[in-house]
Structures are given as C-alpha cells and as structure tokens.
Image (cartoon, grey):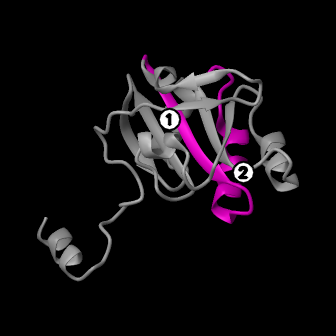
Amino acid sequence: MRRVREMELAGQPKPHSDLPEPGTLVGEFIATTLDGRTISEAIFAHGPSSAVFLISGCSSCSIIVEELARSCADDAPLVVFLGGSASDPEVRTVIEALPDHAVVALIDPISHPARKAMKVSAYPAVLNIVDGVVTYASSRMTSETRQTVNEG
C-alpha cells in the first residue's frame, strides 16, 4: 500500500489502473451485436463469462485474437467489444478471426458505455466475470483468463 501511495504522490499511475479491480460489479450498458441483438450487463449476470475489449491495428489485440481462436471452447460465453466501424477493413479482418461463437459488439473505441460499465480505460482488456462481478482482469491472455474462457 505504501508503494501505491508513493506512486500516486509521484504522479505515476497505479499498477493496472486501466483495468477493473477484482470485485468490480459490471455497471449498466447497452450495446448492439453484429447480428442486431441488443445486449446489456444482464449478459454477464449468471455464471462465468469473459469480456474482451479490442481495437484494430493493435498488435497486443492481434495476439489476443489469435489466442481466442486457438483456445476458446465453443460453449464458452465470450463477449468481444471491438472498437471501430464495420466499414473498416481492419475491423472486418478482426471479426473474421474471432471464434464463431463469440458475441461481438462494435463500439466507439473512446466513449462507449460498456468501457465505463466495466472500468476499462485501455486496450486490450480481458476480463473474467462471474455472476456480474469481475474476478480477474489482464491486458493479455493468461492462464487465469484462458481457464474461464475454456470453462464457460
């Protein structure tokens, strides 16, 4: 705690300050999926799931997309919030590389309410969520994130 306080006084950000802390409740948001469905925080309300925030043109995001394609079980609840426009060829490339079962919502990469609802302020972000509460967050795929994505 002393180290965090020293960093704050020195004007340095806290470690992982771009990601939600474990125990963070998913706030209210509404997003539209690629197939036209409306989703909200209710999609995360029951059981384990994963939320992934990506943007095109981001090398770290590309690595996560590759990991998702390789390691994601078909029945795993996976919601991908992809910053960008459907008319952008790079965004379309990311969409095509995602697992078929992923629920994908295109969002404004800066100001979409889903980012605020989950306290995500940087890309990429991979969140494990259980019963509407963030249990783990990382800027990359880790053994913890892979476990939840694969357990479904």
Mark 1 and mark 2 in contact (Cβ < 8 Å)?
no
Q: Which residue, given by chain and number where applicable, does mark 1 sit on?
A: 147
Q: Check disc 1 and report its element: helix, strand or loop.
A: helix
- Residue extending farthest to the top is 46
Residue in the picture at 65% in, 56% down: 61
Report whether residue 50 is seen. Answer: yes
Q: Check disc 2 and report its element: helix, strand or loop.
A: loop
Q: Earlier in the sequence, mark 2 or mark 1?
A: 2
Instruction: Measure the alpha-carbon separation of dots 2 and 1.
Output: 28 Å
In the rendered image, the quadrant that contains the N terminus is: bottom left
Residue in the picture at 50% in, 27% down: 49
Residue 12, above or below 84: below
The disc labelled 2 sits on which kind of residue? Answer: Gly
The reply, left or right, for residue 120 in relation to residue 90 is: left
Pick whichever, 81 or 23, lies toward us: 81
- Residue extending farthest to the bottom is 10
Give coordinates of residue 104: x percent, y percent.
Answer: 69, 34
Report whether residue 76 is seen. Answer: no
In the rendered image, the quadrant that contains the C terminus is: top right
The reply, left or right, for residue 151 in relation to residue 130 is: right
* Magenta-drawn stretch contains 152: no
The reply, left or right, for residue 10 in relation to residue 102 is: left
Pick whichever, 108 or 63, lies toward us: 108
The disc labelled 1 sits on which kind of residue? Answer: Gln
Q: Which residues are magenta?
A: 46-75
* Magenta-drawn stretch contains 57: yes
Q: Which residue, given by chain and number where applicable, does mark 2 sit on?
A: 84
Pick whichever, 101 or 19, lies toward us: 19
Callout 1: few (<14), some (14-19), or many (20+) C-alpha neighbours within 10 Å? some
Give coordinates of residue 119: x percent, y percent.
Answer: 40, 47
* Picture quadrant of residue 116: top left
Give coordinates of residue 131: x percent, y percent.
Answer: 38, 22
